[in-house]
Amino acid sequence: MNTAFLRWVELDRSGLPAQPEYPFDLPVLHQLERLAFHPKVTYLIGENGIGKSTLMEALAVACGFNPEGGGRNLQFATRATHSELHAHLRLARGVRTPRDGYFFRAESYYNVATRIDELDAEPSFGAPIRNAYGGRSLHEMSHGESFFATFMHRFGGRGLYLLDEPEAALSPLRQMAMLSQVHELVRRHSQFVIATHSPILMAYPDAAIYTLSPEGIVQTPWEETEHYVITKQFLNHTDRMLGELLQDE
């Protein structure tokens, strides 16, 4: 684990409020002690509402990123809605320092694209920021194209990349292409932490998958994840499952 930019994160419970309120009442935080990161790729998976995005946001802020997303130098606030969870996280960092970094958050990526356009419209002696994303405004692309342009052009290697549901606008084919890009960036000494629902994205073989639930945080083999099992059952037994799902009352 000494090759990782991030080695582990833990929740400092000493300063938590006596009466838990959001986000400290989220199920995932009830069981969070110390979470060790894989030096290449770590996946956080679980049902909606368990707290994956809140944990990813807090981790990103603790690492110096904007809670709405972007690189460390892209600091802005459309609306300050992030929680104070980041102030209660303790991070163990590795001996290496990342040269690049990015917090990708599907939920607020429109805000990131807008801020980039605003900055590019201001007088500057430097190159337009959009050049790092392939040379076009992200608003001049489809939702999926803008996501993919970020992964393919903006991520430069030797970086720490935190991705929250990056598959949200990607077709299955683009998800497979993204998985290939993750591998290329890992070969260039990068580390990923990815919250996802996609069984395609979580298929990277040299990784750790953590299932988050009210019962705890458990490292889970890919083939035993609920996402893999349910998708496989649906594809292998489509008629039977459709019959159960679509039956008349």
Image: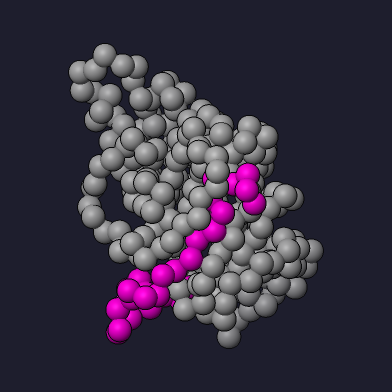
Between 89 and 131, the residue placed more toward the observer is 89
**In this rendering, would 61 be left or right of 248?**
left
Between 237 and 48, the residue placed more toward the observer is 48
**In this rendering, would 57 be left or right of 229?**
left
**In this rendering, would 164 be left or right of 240?**
left
Q: How is the image coloured?
A: one colour
Q: Position of residue 64 (x, y in %)?
A: 37, 46
Question: Which residue is depicted at the point 49% across and 32% down?
Answer: 99
Outermost residue toward the left in this view: 123
Quadrant of res 109: top left
Q: Is residue 166 visible?
A: no
User: Magenta span has 26?
Assistant: yes
Outermost residue toward the right in this view: 236
Q: Position of residue 89 (x, y in %)?
A: 41, 63
Asked if 207 appears above or below 155 in the picture, the reply is below
Question: Which residue is depicted at the point 65% across and 60% down?
Answer: 209
Outermost residue toward the front in this view: 95
Q: Position of residue 211 (x, y in %)?
A: 61, 68
Q: How many marks?
A: 0
Between 239 and 165, the residue placed more toward the observer is 165
Question: Which residue is depicted at the point 63% across and 71% down?
Answer: 218
Q: Is residue 214 visible?
A: yes
Quarter of the rendering occupied by the C terminus: bottom right
Q: Position of residue 126 (x, y in %)?
A: 31, 16
Dominant SS type (magenta): loop
Q: Which residues are magenta?
A: 1-28
Question: Which residue is depicted at the point 30% across and 64% down?
Answer: 84
User: Magenta span has 46?
Assistant: no
Asked if 204 appears above or below 150 in the picture, the reply is below
